[in-house]
């Protein structure tokens, strides 16, 4: 198991909240667990699934808005 703290920032998007919410909703189709915090989403699961989930967030965000910063911090130490 690994965990990733991921934050997506759609630059200049007036509807940035809806873009981020759609990215988070896309995680429902994947075999990971996640927790939404104020500034990021924590994604937890098997290594390949977590990397796939971050890719899904990135792809969905780019589909919705072309200017994006995505920050991801991975850890192999998962709390709880």
Image (cartoon, rainbow, N blue to C red):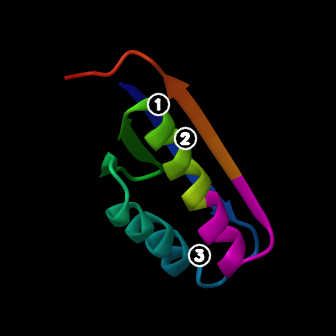
Asked if residue 50 is among those painted magenta in the image, a careful observer would answer: no
Which image quarter holds the C terminus? Answer: top left
Q: Do the CB atoms of the residues marked 1 and 2 lie less than 8 Å apart?
A: yes
Tell which of 47 and 80 is nearer to you: 47
As displayed, is residue 27 above or below residue 13? Answer: above
| Residue 51, disc | 2
Q: Judge left or right: residue 53 versus residue 8.
A: left
Image point 44% across, 17% down: which residue? Answer: 76
User: Which residue, given by chain and number where applicable, does mark 1 sit on?
Assistant: 47
Image point 46% across, 40% down: which residue? Answer: 50
Secondary element under disc 1, as helix, strand or loop, is helix
Image point 53% across, 28% down: which residue? Answer: 74
Residue 11's quadrant in the figure? bottom right
What range of the chain is rendered magenta?
58-69
Q: What is the crowding at mark 1: few (fewer than 14 residues within 10 Å), some, or many (at least 20)?
A: some
Q: Determine the residue located farthest toward the right in the rendered image.
A: 67
Label 2 to label 3: alpha-carbon separation: 23 Å
Q: Do the CB atoms of the residues marked 2 and 3 lie less than 8 Å apart?
A: no
Tell which of 8 and 29 is nearer to you: 29
Image point 43% across, 68% down: which residue? Answer: 26
User: Which residue, given by chain and number where applicable, does mark 3 sit on?
Assistant: 16
């Amino acid at each position: 198991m690994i965990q990733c703290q991921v934050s997506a920032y759609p630059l200049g998007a007036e509807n940035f909240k809806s873009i981020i919410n759609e990215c988070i909703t896309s995680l429902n189709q994947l075999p990971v667990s996640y927790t939404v915090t104020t500034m990021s989403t924590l994604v937890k699961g098997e290594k390949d699934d977590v990397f796939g989930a971050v890719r899904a967030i990135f792809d969905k965000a780019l589909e919705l808005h072309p200017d994006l910063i995505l920050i991801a911090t991975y850890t192999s130490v998962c709390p709880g």
